[in-house]
Image: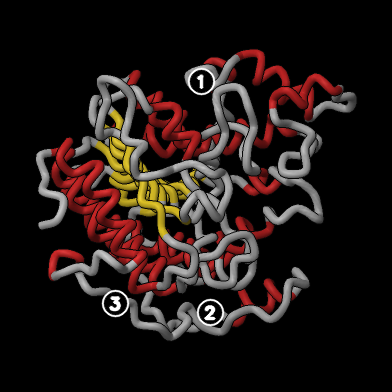
């Protein structure tokens, strides 16, 4: 392979901007790339940063309805009208902003470029941190997501001849849009590990949702109780994700790294540290090599602490993908702290860690049927594992 890591990035991606009062602040992308750059990650041998082309309408139509694409263009124009409301646009979650289609298509193009680089062998791994917009449906915006770039990348890969793709989503919210796109397609295994739908948007993603007729076992949902911390989160991850990827043997692994699982995130209720998020990224990297011949496409996702959490975790993800992981106690560069301080978001963090040591007790060593976390793991394994020839409780 010609390169280690292809990074699809253009500062214009920060024009995906819902407005000053919206929780999805585009500065989180800028600060991530600046932190990765200042730590030398983007200069590691084999890493290339490439400005992608925007996805064309024809490419977007691999996933999205043409009438919806037209509505997105209208929503971003000078004169949107009430017709856009039928498409989930012009709402509090998804308000109109100028150039909505252009910004959204550029992000979708970034994830497409990442998938193309990996599938063609230009790079072993590829990332679009602006991507991961997993809630968008075929004809509706949802949850801050306009075009569903992971689903689009998977559709392109299937068109190119792939017939086994795994998608792992560790955002705190259920990856409902990607699951919906492939619920009836046995070629795509979607795994979403999220807060239980009883306590969080979008209210879907129960373990019993396992795939449509002819694709049973293709949709995997780990619905975690609110308040889950590092040890439980990693226990659930390792109890479900590695066995299924090993059994499925994908040709390519697509991952979504939403960091709204963090304990400080204002929109959710899990209690995960940056250090555990880094540990999960490292595990996914290992699984890409162990199960998918190293083919790994990485996207961002949610995360609403734009200074203290998103830049550090996603820089760890990029460093991991570049085969140049950062020691957790590495200081954040003084130049980055000075730059970040100018964004008026508070005091920038001093190091790349929260001084926790991620650890967990493997599920296979024993479980407690009365424990809510183990109940969640058992529910998922019981619903899914037999479909893949695996024993649920061993």
Q: Quadrant of the N terminus?
A: top left
- Residue at 10% from the left image edge and 57% from the top image edge: 394
Of circles 1 and 3, the one toward us is 3
90 or 194: which is nearer to us?
194
- Residue at 34% from the left image edge and 64% from the top image edge: 373
Q: Is residue 184 above or below residue 208?
A: above
User: Residue 263: x, y in percent?
Assistant: 53, 72
Query: In this figure, which residue is indicated by the disc labeled 1?
Result: 59
Disc 3, SS: loop
CA separation in Å, label 2 and label 3: 24 Å
Query: In this figure, which residue is indicated by the disc labeled 2?
Result: 332
Disc 2, SS: loop
Q: Is residue 363 above or below residue 15?
A: below
**What colour scheme governs how the chains and residues are painted in the rendered image of this protein?**
secondary structure
CA separation in Å, label 1 and label 2: 39 Å
Of circles 1 and 2, the one toward us is 1
Label 1 crowding class (10 Å Cα cut-off): few <14, some 14-19, many 20+? Answer: some
Query: In this figure, which residue is indicated by the disc labeled 3?
Result: 359
CA separation in Å, label 1 and label 3: 42 Å
């Amino acid at each position: 392979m010609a390169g280690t890591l292809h990074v699809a990035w253009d500062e214009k991606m920060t024009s995906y901007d819902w407005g000053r009062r919206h929780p999805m602040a585009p500065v989180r992308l800028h600060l991530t790339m600046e932190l990765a750059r200042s730590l030398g990650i983007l200069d590691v041998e084999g890493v290339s940063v490439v400005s992608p082309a925007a996805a064309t309408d024809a490419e977007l139509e691999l996933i999205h309805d043409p009438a919806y694409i037209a509505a997105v263009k209208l929503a971003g124009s000078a004169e949107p009208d009430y017709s856009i409301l039928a498409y989930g646009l012009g709402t509090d979650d998804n308000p109109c902003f100028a150039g909505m289609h252009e910004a959204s298509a550029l992000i979708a193009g970034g994830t497409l470029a990442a998938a193309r680089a990996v599938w063609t062998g230009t790079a072993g791994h590829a990332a679009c941190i602006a991507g991961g917009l997993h809630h968008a449906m075929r004809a509706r915006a949802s949850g801050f997501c306009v075009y569903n770039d992971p689903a689009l990348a998977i559709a392109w890969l299937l068109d190119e001849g792939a017939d086994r793709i795994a998608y792992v989503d560790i955002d705190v919210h259920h990856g409902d849009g990607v699951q919906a796109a492939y619920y009836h397609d046995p070629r795509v295994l979607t795994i979403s590990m999220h807060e239980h739908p009883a306590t969080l948007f979008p209210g879907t993603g129960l373990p019993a949702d396992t795939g449509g007729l002819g694709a049973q076992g293709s949709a995997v949902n780990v619905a975690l109780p609110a308040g889950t911390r590092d040890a439980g989160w990693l226990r659930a991850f390792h109890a479900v994700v590695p066995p299924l990827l090993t059994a499925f043997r994908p040709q390519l692994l697509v991952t979504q790294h939403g960091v709204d699982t963090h304990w400080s995130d204002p929109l959710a209720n899990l209690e995960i540290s940056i250090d555990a998020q880094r540990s999960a990224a490292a595990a996914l990297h290992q699984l890409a090599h162990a199960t998918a011949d190293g083919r790994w496409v990485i996207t961002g996702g949610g995360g609403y602490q734009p200074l203290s959490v998103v830049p550090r975790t996603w820089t760890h993800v990029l460093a991991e993908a570049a085969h140049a992981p950062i020691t957790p106690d590495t200081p954040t560069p003084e130049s980055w702290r000075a730059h970040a301080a100018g964004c008026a978001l508070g005091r920038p963090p001093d190091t790349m860690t929260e001084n926790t040591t991620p650890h967990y007790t493997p599920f296979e060593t024993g479980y407690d049927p009365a424990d809510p976390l183990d109940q969640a793991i058992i529910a998922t394994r019981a619903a899914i594992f037999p479909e893949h020839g695996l024993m649920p409780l061993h």
